[in-house]
Image (tube, rainbow, N blue to C red):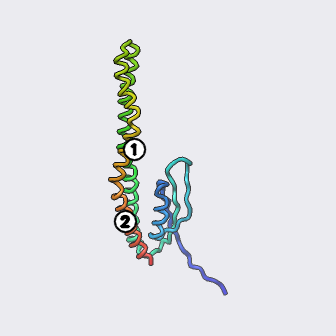
Amino acid sequence: MQETRNFVGYEYKEVAVNRDMEGVYADAYPSFGWVLEGSAHPVIGTPAAILKFKRDRKIHNKAELTRLQRQFEGSAREIEKLEQSKTTKATITAFIIGIIGTAFMAGSVFAFLGNMIPLCIVLAVPAFIGWALPYFSFLRLTAKRTEAVTPLIDRQYDTIYEVCEKAHGLLA
């Protein structure tokens, strides 16, 4: 008895994602009819990963699945932006404080070279504070921003789960 096989045409998709989000994409894309074929990490030490997917070209509800997939991708990008925003302000603030501390140290050095020892000491104190304070301000601002952003990230994950659930229902 001869087995008959139907031809299946596939469409292929490569998605470049942040490694932190690699699992989310790998779990979500099958809800849109995609099958994970593999992943690649192009350069060691970079935060990027490339996920390779395929799906049947003649999949049912393709337009609606594509719309839901775009909605998922938008929510995933929003999560990445929110995650990045946790440290952006803290990094800028710490950098500015460190530069101000360095400026005070430069003034202290010039005062020392000009034999103005009391001024040198007065300028050195804020300089050392300006070098030590960025670490603590970074930690405090990051914790504060994380607390504010976490509910927004959770809402985006809830949106992703709802979208994937709808898409999965269309495939069934």
As drawn, the residue found furthest toward the right would be 1
Res 128 quadrant in image: top left
Asked if labels 2 and 1 touch by Cβ distance under 8 angstroms, the answer is: no
> Residue flagged by tag 1: what amino acid is it?
Leu
Question: Is residue 78 placed above or below 10 in the rendered structure?
Answer: above
Give the labeled residue for mark 1: 139
Disc 2 residue crowd, few under 14, some 14–19, many 20+, Cα 10 Å = few
The answer to which of 117 and 106 lies nearer the viewer is: 117
Q: Which mark is residue 41?
A: none
Q: Earlier in the sequence, mark 1 or mark 2?
A: 1
Q: Which mark is residue 158?
A: 2
Which quadrant does the N terminus fall into?
bottom right
Disc 1 residue crowd, few under 14, some 14–19, many 20+, Cα 10 Å = some
Judging from the image, what secondary structure is the residue with disc 1 in? helix
The x, y position of residue 99, in whole percent, is 38, 31
The answer to which of 23 and 10 lies nearer the viewer is: 23
Question: Is residue 57 placed above or below 108 in the rendered structure?
Answer: below
The answer to which of 114 and 163 lies nearer the viewer is: 114
The x, y position of residue 161, in whole percent, is 40, 67
Judging from the image, what secondary structure is the residue with disc 2 in? helix
Say how many tags the image has. 2
Nearer the observer, disc 1 or disc 2? 1
Question: Is residue 48 placed above or below 167 in the rendered structure?
Answer: above
**Residue drawn 35% across the image and 45% down it:** 141
The answer to which of 7 and 109 lies nearer the viewer is: 109
Question: Is residue 84 placed above or below 120 in the rendered structure?
Answer: below
**Residue drawn 53% across the image and 61% down it:** 52
Q: CA distance from mark 1 to mark 2?
A: 28 Å
Which quadrant does the C terminus fall into?
bottom left
> Residue flagged by tag 2: what amino acid is it?
Asp
The x, y position of residue 119, in whole percent, is 34, 18
The x, y position of residue 162, in whole percent, is 37, 69
